[in-house]
Image: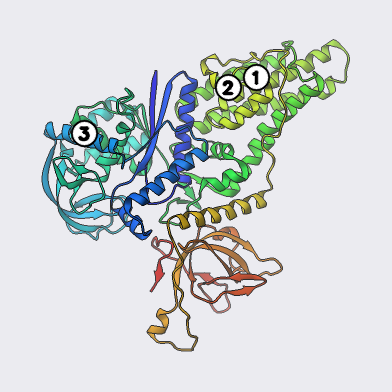
Amino acid sequence: MKYYLTTPIYYVNAAPHLGHTYTTIAADAIRRFKRMQGYEAVLTTGTDEHGSKVEGAARASGMTPQAFTDLISAEFRDQWETLGLAIDRFMRTTDPRHAATVQRLFERCLANGYIYKGTYTGAYCVFCELYAGEGQGGAPCPDCGRPTETVSEENYFFKLSAFQDRLLELYEQQPDFIQPEVRRNEVTAFVRQGLSDLSITRTTLKWGIPVPTDPRHVFYVWFDALSTYMSAVEGEDLWPADLHLIGKEITRFHAIYWPAFLMAAGLPLPKRIFAHGWLLFEQDKMSKSRGNIVRPDPVRKVMGIDPLRYFLLREINFGQDGSFSYDALVGRYNADLANGLGNLVSRTLKMIQDYTAGAVPELAGGPASAEIAGLATATIAEVIQAFENFQFSRGLESLWNLLSAVDKFIVEQAPWQLAKRDDDASQAAMRDTLYTAADVLRVATVLLVPIMPSAAARIWRQLGMTEPLEKARLECLVPRQLVPGQRIGELAPLFPRLEMQPAIDRMRALEAAELARQNALLGKTAAPAAAARAGERISIDDFAKVDMRVGVVLAAARVKRTDTLIELTVDLGEAAPRIVVAGIAGAYQPEQLIGRKVVIVANLQPRKLRGIESNGMIVAASPEGGLPVLVGFLEDVPVGARLT
């Protein structure tokens, strides 16, 4: 049985971050889960490399579009490899094999009468690469709210309007085609309002795949990018996809455009589209334009990738928006992994080592252990059902309830006391307790493979299991299958406890270093500084020499031995973040500042404050007799923007 799933084809106008990682980790977990059900699961991801935004990003980095996309696409591939994600197919939209697939799709739609040539004049959102309706530009984009531009050009159009009834019939007859239900309701309501024909080519853009019969035209992003799901597995008998896993902001393109393109071409439709929610940082969507991006590698270096996988899939109800913070990450790591699972593994196996000479004891079959076995049976069913519905958080909650029950069982049975007694009943109860705890760990390890594959493999080895973990099948998973007499493996700590603030400080420092590496990779350099003259009154020319820029605070900490100063690490869109020392400790706590947009005077001479070199000054209002108030913005302003 095959199971073909995909992530979005990630846009390469910026390097990968935690938002991309969230989707890809979820897809990796689903792939592993399906393989444990006996499916030949294949996961595709890739990079979307055409369009005006890519041209602009390449130009800003001083590169050709091809060199820029080569660089960023390699960053995505390297990121997934570093994080241990099991990617089976990786397709770039600049690959000639992909271009051939796009052109064949176009030719089929054209031959079937669903494409025609016309002229488009109207509003266009460069950021979303979305035609936003006829009329003049300037109005807000319906998706992102940014101002649109007016464009007028000859295009090839797709007859999207011809598919309104067929799409509504699809949603009605196949309710699980779009999930969760809230996304299906949104798409259905949108289609019922009526569909307009869709421009699928542009003549003003050169960086793209040319139309085979009219090379002045290149394909517009969605006709190009969506076809990657097919081009990645061309000739492999894997289409149609069983699952497209996407973020909710691109639901419309996947649930309306994509099935309509395939209907027009006479090709099979994907079976399911699941749109998860946004990953929020400080209650705002994590995105490049907001300057609040977090990258996964600093987390990996501090605690490993499995705790991040666990946090994202346990903390967030998949399908809904969810929040990420370093505090919550470290807190859940310590509570669930260090004090929970890790401690249970350590204490159970150490007692087997000490009390039964390192061999799994015989099961006597007392009533208390039978109750735990019954709970384990119910938990296996609950977890499998939850994972089948992508309810990872609910499944993990059920599993941790089982682990908590075993913890309580161990405390109540007190095997350390039973081991001191010589009577047969006590020895049997001790063996019962240790066998039951170890067997539940075996069950939990198998269930955790999709979520924490590396940690599961380590627990498996410590249990002394001889069967390869990758051969474990969920339909065969039942309690009380641990073999008595089996020797446990070498014991080692799984999740050492982390001190909250030092761990957070290290992740933030590594985040700043990773940002600097990515900026250097993209050729970002510091803006030239100009010396400002002091004086009570200045001319407009003098004012122009003051270089004020928008930055985002990456890290903040109080300066030792002072009540007024905070040391800030600020990203101004330069090659490396700056250190700025500000006298705002009376008005703000350091944690309030992380992720906040601020204004920095960027061309001041460096100055040492309490031994720390400050490279810039934060701009704040100073009400008479009051505390300083940082300058902010009502609208979204990109990092590095200059105030004029």
Question: What separation in Å lies between label 3 and label 2 (alpha carbons)?
Answer: 42 Å
Q: Residues within 10 Å of mark 3 (few under 14, many from 20)?
A: many
Amino acid of disc 2 = Leu
On the rendered structure, is 409 left or right of 612? right
**Tags 2 and 1 in contact by the CB under 8 Å rule?**
yes
Residue 328's x, y, as percent?
59, 46
Q: Nearer the viewer, residue 487 or 627?
A: 487
Report the front residue among 191 and 67.
Answer: 67
In the picture of the structure, the residue carrying the numbered disc 3 is 105
Q: Residue drawn at (80%, 19%), measured in percent from left and top? A: 357
Instruction: Give neighbour class at mark 1: few <14, some 14-19, many 20+ (Cα, 10 Å).
Output: some
Q: CA distance from mark 2 to mark 1?
A: 8 Å
Q: Nearer the viewer, residue 552 or 397?
A: 552
Q: Position of residue 321 (x, y in %)?
A: 45, 43
The colour scheme is rainbow
Q: Check disc 2 and report the residue beneath it.
A: 469
Q: Which residue is mark 1?
A: 465
- Dots 3, 2 in contact, CB < 8 A: no
- Quick check: 367 left or right of 45? right
Q: Quadrant of residue 164?
A: top left
On the question of residue 379 being in view, the answer is: no
Q: Is residue 469 above or below residue 316?
A: above
Q: Relative to 483, say whether 407 is above or below.
A: below
Q: Left or right of 539: which side holds 448? A: right
Q: Residue at x 55, y 55 (%)?
A: 513
